[in-house]
Image (spheres, helix red, strand yellow):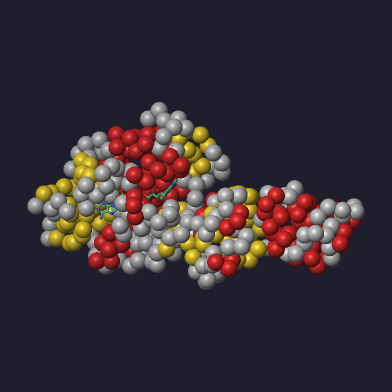
Amino acid sequence: MERAEVVILGAGGAGLFCAGSLAGRGLRVVVLDHARAPGEKIRISGGGRCNFTNLGTSHETFLSQVPRFCASALAGFRPEDFVALVDRAGIAWHEKTQGQLFCDGRASQIVQMLVDRMGGAELRLGVAVTAVTRHAEGLRVDTSKGPLLAAHVVVATGGKSIPRMGATGIGYDIARATGHRLTDTRPGLVPLTFAEQDLGLSAPLSGIGIEARAALPKAPGRRAVAFQDRLLFTHRGLSGPVILQISSYWQPGEPLALDLAPGHDIADLLKQARAEGGRAQAATLLARYLPDRLAAAIAAELGMTGAPLAAQSDARIKGLARRIHDWRIRPVGTEGYRTAEVTVGGVDCRDLDARSLRSRHVPGLYFVGEVVDVTGWLGGYNFQWAWASGHAAAQAI
Ligand code: FDA
């Protein structure tokens, strides 16, 4: 049987980075991927410009059943360390917002940098991994092109999101078959969908974006969460960064609380306008804070068209303000793995060592990147986890 010291399963961000961190150590390293090219998700990420890290990375920007698990690996390879590599490779970048760093040019520059950094590691594409089993002399990796025997196997096969980009869930199968627990998995960073009867506002406004706040109350195993960012109305429900962020926390059946005009006090503003004469209609005033069509749709929904503000009661104004600042909507689901940027959940952190990402049950076996129950917020955190966890495993090998 063919032998290598290290076999890395998956040539995504985590696998490539792990291979690069092993370079120069004189080990025989083989990286396997069934795709035709390495780093396909990196290539399409960040709208083609790759949001490769976030300067505000901390364990608090990740979801996991073991909330502090990721802290150790993140401390061992920080956003600044990745920036140093990007600078050394001569890749121009900029900070977009909230610590999010993007390439000025194409994301493929990052893929090239990672492949160059791998040194002598052998990258084998078009090879599907089917199983990992214990063997008297190490670990046996079964593939579509025959088996390999290795002292160390790093599972970096990602999650289930975007199957057309190569996602398979094989990492979970390997974890389960080798005695590891899995936490429940679900699509994360994903648009939310509404039932037909709740699409009255969203569908006609499809394509309109606003600044909004989305919140979920405290629930078993979850603190209260809230995000403020752009919201986008879609034909099927809601999307945009604020919705993607909250989607990772949302549990089926839960209502979402949305503030469509954060930072304003709509009731106060309308009452003030009414006191000053109130000749305009509610929708006209609302349009100072919301897009015209959204303002008109909400006013119409609450039957506040046709009469000036002067004719509107306190109760109606309060009702309108509640509709804008505390819109309770119960999504029926998400757009699923077809469009989800990540998979929430995965290999249970209790079965891994936090410093090395090494299995607590199988000597020589590691899990890194998205396959682990560590899921970052939107904004470059997921790649930082891929780099840091890949690096941590390499340091331990
Ligand atoms: P990843 O999924 O990247 O790699 C796994 C590899 O394993 C793949 O190459 C796959 O082909 C291979 N594989 C799977 N099954 C296999 C099998 N059976 N045999 C062989 N190979 C197999 N994050 C971020 O921080 N900033 C951003 O800008 C974005 N943008 C973004 C956009 C879009 C559209 C998506 C879908 C996702 C993002 N993300 C992101 C998330 C980010 O892409 C993700 O968290 C990392 O790519 C995870 O890296 P991994 O290496 O763990 O998995």
The residue sitting at 48% across, 55% down in the picture is 189
The residue sitting at 90% across, 53% down in the picture is 277
In the rendered picture of this protein, how many numbered marks are placed on residues? 0
Which quadrant of the view contains residue 260? bottom right
Q: Is residue 234 visible from the viewing direction of this image?
A: yes
- Percent position of residue 341, x then y: 43, 52
- Percent position of residue 268, x then y: 81, 57
- Percent position of residue 209, x then y: 60, 49
Q: Is residue 79 visible from the viewing direction of this image?
A: no
In the image, is 277 to the left or to the right of 38? right
- Percent position of residue 289, x then y: 72, 49
Which quadrant of the view contains residue 134? bottom left
Toward the viewer: 332 or 388? 332
- Looking at this rendering, what residue extends furthest in the left direction? 1
- Looking at this rendering, what residue extends furthest in the top direction? 90
Toward the viewer: 122 or 367? 122
In the image, is 233 to the left or to the right of 270? left
Toward the viewer: 249 or 385? 249
- Residue 358's place in the image compared with 25, above or below, is below
Toward the viewer: 253 or 291? 291
The residue sitting at 52% across, 59% down in the picture is 236
In the image, is 14 to the left or to the right of 329? left
The residue sitting at 72% across, 61% down in the picture is 300
